């Protein structure tokens, strides 16, 4: 079953903690500012994500959400990762 990976860009303060802890180097900071004036994180290489959820656990602003979704369920504002 795939997962829906969402980073709520407007909660992100661009601290880069998730980028640093990701073991697969999936994440990067955007070069476009969010509504708070920060450069938010995004999945630059989603195909490499192993859905370990370390980024999600580490984010001090609870901006990252990973949820299991059915094949037919939409992943609004995010992208599908994994298929286990
Ligand atoms: S779930 Fe794991 S592999 Fe995927 S982006 Fe987060 S830290 Fe990286
Ligand atoms: S850890 Fe959270 S607040 Fe920091 S860059 Fe990543 S998503 Fe944004």
Image (tube, helix red, strand yellow):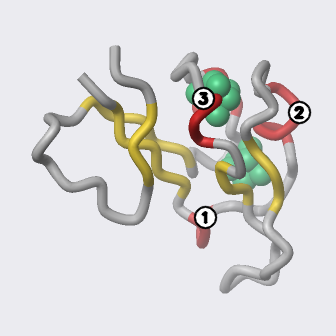
Please tell me the numbered disc located at residue 20.
Answer: 2
Q: Answer with the quarter of the image where residue 1 lies.
A: top left
User: Which dot, 1 or 2, sits closer to the camera?
Assistant: 2
In the image as oriented, which residue stretches furthest toward the front? 47
Marks 1 and 2 in Cβ contact (< 8 Å): no
Residue 58: x percent and y percent?
A: 70, 29
Sequence-wise first label, 2 or 3: 2
Residue shown at 39%/43% (left/top)?
Answer: 80
Viewer-side residue, 17 vs 30: 30
Residue drawn at x 64%, y 29% as measured from the top left: 48
Q: Is mark 3 within 8 Å of ligand 1?
A: yes
Q: Earlier in the sequence, mark 1 or mark 2?
A: 1
Label 1 packing within 10 angstroms: few (<14), some (14-19), many (20+):
some
Give the residue at x 86% y 47%: 16
Q: Secondary structure at mark 3?
A: loop
**Spatial distance from mark 1 to mark 2, Cα to Cα?**
18 Å
The residue that label 3 is drawn on is 49
Instruction: Say if 49 sits above or below 29 in the image.
Output: above
- CA gap, disc 3 and disc 1: 21 Å
Query: CB atoms at circles 3 and 1 under 8 Å apart?
Result: no
Q: Is residue 55 visible?
A: no
Would residue 54 be seen by someone viewing this image from the given angle? yes
Q: Mark 2 and ligand 2: say if the CB distance to the nearest ligand atom is below 8 Å.
A: no
First of labels 3, 1 by sequence position: 1
Residue visible at 55% across and 54% down in the picture: 7
From the image, tell me which residue sits under label 1.
Answer: 11
């Amino acid at each position: 079953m795939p997962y829906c990976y969402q980073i709520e860009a407007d909660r992100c303060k661009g601290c880069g903690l998730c980028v640093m802890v990701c073991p697969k180097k999936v994440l990067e900071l955007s070069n476009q500012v969010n509504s708070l004036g920060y450069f938010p994180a995004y999945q630059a290489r989603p195909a490499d994500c192993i859905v370990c959820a370390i980024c999600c656990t580490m984010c001090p602003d609870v901006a990252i959400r990973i949820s299991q979704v059915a094949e037919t369920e939409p992943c609004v504002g995010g992208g599908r990762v994994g298929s286990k």
